């Protein structure tokens, strides 16, 4: 859309001036800012910053949680043609040095004393940082530092400036153009210094309107803004789309009150990464275990129905009359109260992104009537690349390319994206920009994936981890170890999996069973065992794991590009993979290469005709002692399926 963020603000203020724009919880009471009041606040701040010397094209840092006056400050900077840079409020002081110096920042607006202290701590390393404004004055009464002042004084100065020059604000807004830089977001910088991702008004606003149109967002939506504003996802949901759609953004009192505030607000449009959805569900299940026997029985009975009927119901597919009546009763007894307890009783659209979400978790929320979907995007693409239509939400895809997006695959299987939402470039880093942006406008995502037969994008792995099958019926086909491993780990009986197949004729895996889950399964069947090693090698356990493997194979056979990644042989390891033994990282990620070297005889056995193999492994105990675990491991064969071709 051919406009800028300040113009969108003025448009919303003109159309719905007395309606709520933002709410902020303070001392337990929700305070409302109308669109008209927000426009007046932005004008005062803009005039104050103009009087203080903020120049067009200059950068200004904003640090804090979601607060109406911090959002207003970003709008004020954009009104003057300056460029706000939101930084993470939980970053330590030294992490702020590079962004501030890289962008030559003179002006900084922060939330409170904590952030002021950070800026003062690094001021000797950022000598150009001349103006620091703070929103919350608590604890700052006795601070006497040059260039440090309260936002209240900036607003007062700005109002005086606006009275003296009535046309100043509107004139500055009119100077802004859609292709002007609107904001800069710094990447995490895990492999070196962070990179500043430069976005224009046009790129951010285009994606905001596309996302809003896709999910039919209206001014009546309610959003809870609780994730860091420095993350572009939160910025899109509570800033760009807020201005595009004109809905209400609610700011929690603190991180500690988010769960309570979620229930009070009852958002209609909600976003959270998978770990938040996992945490919410875990809390519910823990409380359910503490409930009485009757309530537990009712919960589990209703959830069994929900898992069977709920997904079809929310996807608009027909269900039987009896099941519809049962589901309605379950909604009255369990699902409705559960949604209310989660704070999602009014959620119309919920999104998750950032990492793979387990299908059971995904299905749970959709089963109880919450329209949870996945999306695909990044900082460089202004978030919206792929979205899931309401009736096509699946756990194993990230949706279909949304309006204006083109996707193609490189020869290596990397996903390339062309979109109106692509970054302008990395700030002061032409080499990095050239690495990700081609001359003809394609962005290299570094992700490997493909479009399935239904037009949905599937993310497989990072490109650097993807290999190829060599020889056999699937010679040259793609092998994605992480994708295969994750599919296996979606089964509760499998704790870890290590897949091999790159430059080999077939795929083989080593599996760690989940001792608790498989132990419970065995006890329910009166299957005795003496410990992990004994349980892992039970023929019944091999049959259980084989069933999981073959279900994965059947699913892979429906993906033409990944049919060659079906698992031919597997074994269940005699010990759990352990960080103390070097097999996992300290964050519990599998060290595939190390394991291949440590268990090279097992890898060789998997790729031979052996049906079993004896192994003795040294292990380290918690008290520092070392010992050994030995066993004769069975090697199982799994059924592989012919690729299922898409209908012509």
Image: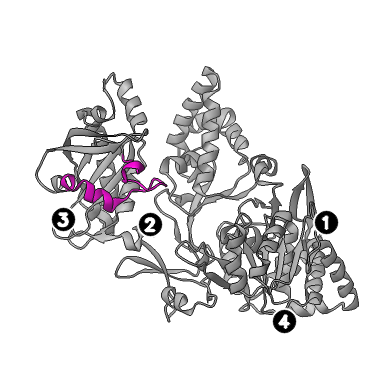
Depth check, front residue: 374 or 324: 374
Q: Circle 3 sits on which residue?
A: 505
Q: Residue at x 21, y 42 (%)?
A: 570
Label 4, residues with CA under 10 Å away: few <14, some 14-19, many ≥20: few
Q: Which residue is drawn at 50% across and 33% down?
A: 324
Q: Which residue is drawn at 42% across and 44% down?
A: 358
Q: Is residue 275 magenta?
A: no
Depth check, front residue: 203 or 290: 290
Depth check, front residue: 204 or 126: 126
Q: Circle 1 sits on which residue?
A: 142
Task: State which tag comes first along the sequence, 4 or 2.
Answer: 4
Per the rendering, the mark at residue 458 is 2
Distance from disc 3 to disc 1, alpha carbons, whole Å, reads 72 Å
The secondary element bearing badge 1 is classed as loop
Distance from disc 3 to disc 4, alpha carbons, whole Å, reads 63 Å
Q: Is residue 594 magenta?
A: yes
How many numbered circles are shown? 4
Residue 634 visible: yes
Residue numbers of the magenta segment: 577-603
The image position of residue 432, as x and y in percent, is 45, 74
The secondary element bearing badge 2 is classed as strand
The secondary element bearing badge 4 is classed as helix
Q: Circle 4 sits on which residue?
A: 175
Label 2, residues with CA under 10 Å away: few <14, some 14-19, many ≥20: many
Which part of the image, by quadrant, shows the N terminus? Answer: bottom right
Mark in front: 1 vs 4: 1
Label 1, residues with CA under 10 Å away: few <14, some 14-19, many ≥20: few
Dots 1 and 4: beta carbons under 8 Å? Answer: no
The image position of residue 249, as x and y in percent, is 69, 54
Answer with left or right where residue 418 lies relative to residue 257. left
């Amino acid at each position: 859309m051919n406009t800028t963020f300040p113009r969108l603000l003025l448009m919303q203020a003109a159309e719905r001036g007395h309606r709520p724009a933002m709410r902020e919880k303070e001392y337990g009471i929700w305070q409302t800012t109308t669109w008209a009041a927000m426009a007046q606040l932005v004008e005062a701040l803009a005039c104050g910053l103009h009087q203080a010397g903020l120049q067009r094209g200059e950068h200004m840092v904003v640090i804090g949680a979601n607060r109406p006056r911090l959002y207003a400050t970003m709008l004020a900077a954009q009104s003057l043609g300056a460029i706000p840079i939101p930084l993470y409020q939980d970053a330590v002081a030294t992490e702020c040095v590079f962004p501030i110096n890289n962008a030559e920042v003179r002006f900084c607006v922060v939330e409170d004393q904590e952030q002021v202290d950070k800026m003062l701590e690094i001021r000797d390393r950022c000598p150009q940082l001349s103006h620091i404004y703070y929103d919350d004055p608590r604890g700052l009464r006795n601070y006497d530092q040059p260039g440090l002042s309260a936002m209240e004084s900036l607003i007062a100065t700005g109002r005086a400036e606006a009275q003296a020059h009535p046309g100043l604000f509107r004139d500055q807004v009119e100077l802004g153009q859609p292709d002007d830089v609107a904001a800069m977001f710094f990447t995490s910088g895990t492999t070196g210094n962070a990179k500043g991702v430069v976005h224009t008004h046009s790129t951010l606003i285009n994606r905001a309107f596309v996302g809003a149109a896709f999910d039919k967002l209206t001014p009546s939506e309610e959003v809870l803004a609780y994730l860091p504003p420095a993350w572009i996802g939160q910025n899109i949901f509570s800033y760009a789309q807020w201005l595009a759609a004109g809905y209400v953004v609610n700011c929690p009192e603190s991180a500690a009150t988010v769960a309570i505030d979620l229930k009070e607000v009852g958002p209609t449009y909600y976003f959270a990464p998978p770990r938040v959805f996992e945490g919410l569900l875990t809390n519910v299940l823990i409380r359910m275990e503490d409930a009485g026997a009757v309530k537990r029985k009712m919960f589990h009975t209703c959830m069994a129905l929900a898992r069977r009927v709920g997904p079809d119901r929310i996807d608009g597919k027909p269900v039987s009359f009896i099941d519809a009546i049962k589901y309605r009763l379950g909604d009255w007894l369990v699902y409705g109260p559960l949604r209310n307890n989660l704070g999602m009783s009014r959620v119309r659209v919920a999104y998750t992104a950032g990492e793979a979400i387990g299908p059971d978790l995904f299905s749970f929320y959709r089963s109880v009537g919450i329209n949870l979907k996945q999306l695909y995007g990044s900082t460089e693409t202004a978030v919206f690349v792929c979205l899931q239509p309401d009736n096509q939400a699946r756990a194993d895809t990230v949706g279909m390319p949304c309006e204006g997006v083109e996707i193609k695959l490189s020869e290596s299987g990397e996903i390339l994206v062309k979109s109106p939402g692509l970054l302008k470039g990395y700030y002061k880093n032409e080499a990095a920009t050239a690495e990700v942006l081609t001359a003809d406008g394609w962005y290299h995502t570094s992700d490997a994936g493909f479009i399935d037969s239904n037009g949905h994008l599937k993310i497989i792995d990072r490109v650097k981890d993807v290999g190829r099958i060599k020889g056999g019926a699937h010679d040259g086909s793609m092998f994605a170890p992480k994708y295969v491993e994750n599919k296996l780990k979606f089964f509760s009986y499998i704790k870890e999996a290590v897949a091999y197949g790159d430059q080999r004729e077939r795929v083989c895996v080593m599996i760690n069973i989940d001792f608790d889950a498989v132990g419970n399964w065995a006890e329910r069947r009166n299957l005795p065992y003496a410990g992990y090693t004994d349980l892992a090698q039970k023929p019944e356990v091999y049959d259980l794991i084989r069933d999981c493997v073959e279900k994965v194979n059947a699913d892979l056979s429906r993906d033409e590009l990944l049919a060659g990644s079906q698992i031919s042989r597997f074994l269940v390891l005699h010990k759990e993979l352990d960080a103390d033994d070097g097999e996992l990282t300290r964050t519990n990620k599998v060290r595939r290469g190390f394991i291949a070297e440590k268990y090279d005889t097992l890898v060789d056995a998997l790729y031979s005709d052996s049906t079993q193999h004896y192994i003795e492994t040294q292990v380290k105990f918690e008290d520092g002692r070392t010992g050994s675990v030995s066993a004769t491991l069975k090697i199982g064969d799994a059924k592989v399926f012919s690729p299922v071709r898409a209908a012509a």
